[in-house]
Amino acid sequence: QVQLVESGGGLVQPGGSLRLSCAASGSIFRIYDMRWYRQAPGKQREWVASITSAGNTNYADSEKGRFTISREYAKNTVDLQMNSLKPEDTAVYYCNARAQIRNSDPVMDYWGKGTPVTVSS
């Protein structure tokens, strides 16, 4: 199994910054894409940003220029630097990884339990 643990959430004022981190552990053969999602109260979970095993990054339109996703391959970690935060960024942020436990296993999605971010004055 692959365990994902997020950290770094909290309360921040509008215009402020937070850095979220996610660490993957367990029996891991290979991690492919790593992604961040978020779910605001009363809304569906939405994709925020992703980074491939080759380091290619993609962002949702509302996050372009404000958020930066990065990855440390040796440590199996992925970070999300969030700047210029807005109240509408308030949500629980989830880490996702596409990974294989063994070479012969299918690629599966794994999720963390989330870390809450509140942007409020």
Image (cartoon, helix red, strand yellow):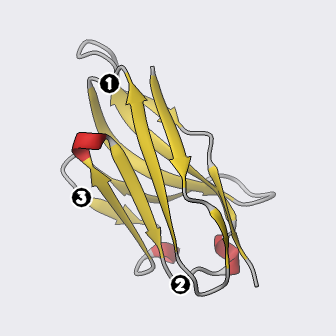
Name the residue beneath numbered marker 2.
84
Q: Which mark is residue 56?
A: 3
Of labels 2 and 1, earlier in sequence is 1
6 horizontally vs 54: left or right? right
Label whose residue precedes the other's in the sequence (1 or 3): 1
Out of 117 and 57, give the one closest to the viewer.
117
- Classify 10 Å Cα crowding around label 1: few (below 14), some (14-19), many (20 and above): some
Q: Secondary structure at mark 3?
A: loop
Nearer the observer, 102 or 76: 76
Q: CA distance from mark 3 to mark 2?
A: 23 Å
34 or 7, nearer to the observer: 7
Which residue sits at x=26%, y=29%? Answer: 30
The label shown at residue 28 is: 1
Around disc 2, counting alpha carbons within 10 Å, would you say few (fewer than 14), some (14 to 19), or many (20 or more)? some
Q: For residue 53, which quarter of the picture?
A: top left
Image spot of residue 66 (x, y percent): 45, 79
Residue at 48% x, 74% y: name it. Answer: 63
